[in-house]
Image: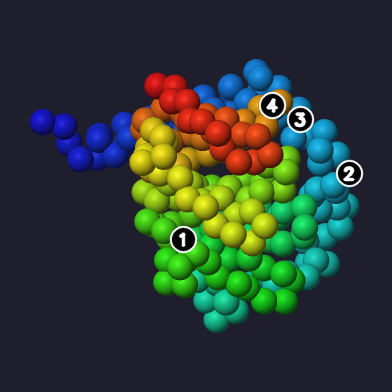
Amino acid sequence: IIHPLLYFFFAFTMLRFFSLLVALFCLVCGALPTIAQERTNVVRGLDPTKPADKYIYTHWQIEQGLPQNNGQCMLQTRDGYLWVGTQEGLARFDGVRFTVFNRKNGALKGSNWATTIFEDRFGTLWVGTNGGGVHRFQNGRWKYYTTAEGLSDNTINSFCTDNQGNIWVGTGGSGITVIMARDSAPTAFAQLA
């Protein structure tokens, strides 16, 4: 009999292994340089010569519109929105207010828990969830993909893209699924175990 803590440690280790495997594969296939080339005009980071107390910061919580105070993942899309994934849904911040997307308002299906957010080269938003599969947001509409459509698992840990625009999906224990994409509309799923 395996002690529950050992099982948790093993599961956590495997989760990290598969996430690193997806990142390594993307690096080998040239996906990361493609992403870097698309974003070379973006300035990242803070001025290291400026003291920390000279920066202004804002603290956002449920009172300011987040669906939950535990941010799991974040992404700023090329249209300027800041997307925050929580265990109770996804929030899009426009600089003034949050718009929440979750099961309660019908935007998300299966699971509110957003685990990863990714924007592809077409500007389509991909959201991975803990047990709810993949959610795609394109032209103001949501589309859902689960094991019923060919995903190898409904728990999603990571996304990356290759030079052809295919979306590589790292899952929570069932390997990698490749969504063969043309204009960000999946045409086939391939499972790599």
- Is residue 49 or residue 80 the one in the foreground? 80
* Disc nearer the start of the sequence (4/2): 2
Give residue 41's mark. Answer: 2
Distance CA(mark 2)–CA(mark 1): 33 Å
Mark 4 or mark 3, which is nearer the start of the sequence? 3
Q: Which mark is residue 163?
A: none
Q: Is residue 190 visible?
A: yes
What residue is drawn where x is 58% and y is 22%?
Answer: 25
- Helix, strand or loop at disc 2? loop
Q: CA–CA distance between discs 1 and 4?
A: 28 Å
Disc 4 versus disc 2: distance between alpha carbons? 22 Å
Instruction: In the rendered structure, find residue 108 and report the number of the disc placed on it.
Output: 1
Q: Residues within 10 Å of mark 2 (few under 14, many from 20)?
A: few
Give the residue at x 37% y 56%: 110
For the residues labelled 1 and 4, say whether their Cβ atoms are less than 8 Å apart.
Answer: no
Circle 2: residue type? Asn
- State the residue position of label 4: 164
Q: Which image quadrant is residue 109 in? A: bottom left
The crowding category of the residue bearing disc 3, from other C-alpha atoms within 10 Å (few below 14, some 14 to 19, many at least 20), is some
Q: CA distance from mark 3 to mark 4?
A: 10 Å
First in sequence: mark 2 vs mark 1: 2
Q: Residue furthest front?
A: 187
